[in-house]
């Protein structure tokens, strides 16, 4: 079995996060379009985002978006900057560090609303 | 797909690869603005039909939302197409998955776009 290193894990994370974001995108376009139908229907639907599961989902979503965004910028960099290909492994650690630096305070801020 | 010639008929996959990079870079900017504005400046406790009505009074937000909707659906839809190609091997299931994907993406674009461009408050 192929066991890659940082490159493989960033690729797996990128795909998993991408699928998760796509599933949420489908739900989010449907819930937003309810506003064109009835204000009541929309208000009842977005109230789901204020439940505990909704708030945990919001934090997971933001994590997935940040990871996919920062790793996507890494992919663009290694595709278009020839010298960056040689440091793709180091760039993955840059992605992880920047992700944690943004996600931890961002998640903490949102998590406070639950308590 | 088997072809006699080794030369690809068109460069669709190259254009798809390029599109993912260009749209991805744009979406990073738009999605982060969207997340900061909706989830941090306001937050889920403030989101209601009234919030949307007020926000869409400003045509710039409508255009912003429409561009984000379009890019996200094309980028996400193309990503899902690549995953279907990679993981769904039986021909019938692959055709079914791709057809369903294209229908869902088209319907979401039509419904979402129509609501955000015609909403009256």
Image: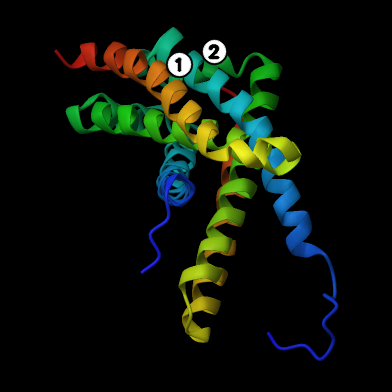
> Element at badge 1?
helix
Quadrant where the C terminus of chain B is found in the figure: top right
Number of numbered discs: 2
Q: Is residue A44 left or right of residue A65?
A: left
Q: Is residue B38 above or below residue A61?
A: above
Q: Residues within 10 Å of mark 1 (few under 14, many from 20)?
A: some
Residue A75 found in image quarter: top right
Q: Chain of mark 2?
A: B
* Cβ–Cβ under 8 Å for marks 2 and 1: yes
Q: What mark, if any, has residue B22 been given in the picture?
A: none
Q: Which residue is mark 1?
A: B50
Distance in Å between CA atoms under marks 2 and 1: 6 Å
**Residue A96 drawn above or below residue A110:** below
Name the colouring of the figure: rainbow
Residue at left offset 53%, top offset 58%: B80
Q: Position of residue B108 (x, y in %)?
A: 55, 49
Instruction: Please say whether residue B117 is visible from this viewpoint.
Output: no
> Horizontal and vertical percent for residue B39?
41, 17
Q: Residues within 10 Å of mark 2 (few under 14, many from 20)?
A: few
Residue at the location (46% across, 47% down)? A26
Q: Quadrant of the N terminus of chain B?
A: bottom right
Give B1 or A89, whichever is nearer the viewer.
A89
The residue at the far bottom in this view is: B4
In the image, B26 versus B46, the foreground residue is B26
Q: Which residue is mark 2?
A: B54
Residue A83 horizontal/vertical position (percent): 72, 36
Q: Residue at x 64, y 19 (%)?
A: B61
Q: Chain of mark 1?
A: B
Q: Secondary structure at mark 2?
A: helix
Q: Position of residue B46 (x, y in %)?
A: 37, 13
Tell which residue pokes out farthest to the front in this image.
A86
């Amino acid at each position: 079995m192929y066991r890659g290193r940082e490159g493989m894990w960033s690729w797996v994370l990128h795909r998993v996060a991408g699928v998760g974001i796509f599933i949420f995108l489908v739900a989010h376009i449907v819930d937003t379009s309810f506003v064109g139908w009835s204000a009541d229907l929309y208000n009842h639907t977005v109230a789901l985002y204020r439940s505990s599961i909704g708030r945990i989902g919001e934090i997971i979503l933001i994590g997935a978006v940040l990871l996919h965004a920062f790793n996507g910028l890494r992919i663009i960099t290694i595709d278009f900057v020839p010298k960056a290909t040689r440091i793709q492994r180091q760039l993955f650690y840059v992605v992880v560090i920047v992700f944690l630096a943004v996600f931890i305070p961002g998640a903490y801020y949102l998590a406070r609303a639950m308590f | 797909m088997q072809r006699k010639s080794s030369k690809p008929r068109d460069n669709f996959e190259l254009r798809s690869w390029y599109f993912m990079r260009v749209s991805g870079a744009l979406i990073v900017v738009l999605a982060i603005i969207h997340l900061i504005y909706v989830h941090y400046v306001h937050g889920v406790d403030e989101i209601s039909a009234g919030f949307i009505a007020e926000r869409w009074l400003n045509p710039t937000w409508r255009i912003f939302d429409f561009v984000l909707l379009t890019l996200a659906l094309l980028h996400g839809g193309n990503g899902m197409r690549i995953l279907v190609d990679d993981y769904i091997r039986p021909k019938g299931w692959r055709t079914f998955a791709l057809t369903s994907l294209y229908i869902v993406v088209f319907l979401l674009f039509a419904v979402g776009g129509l609501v955000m461009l015609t909403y009256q408050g």
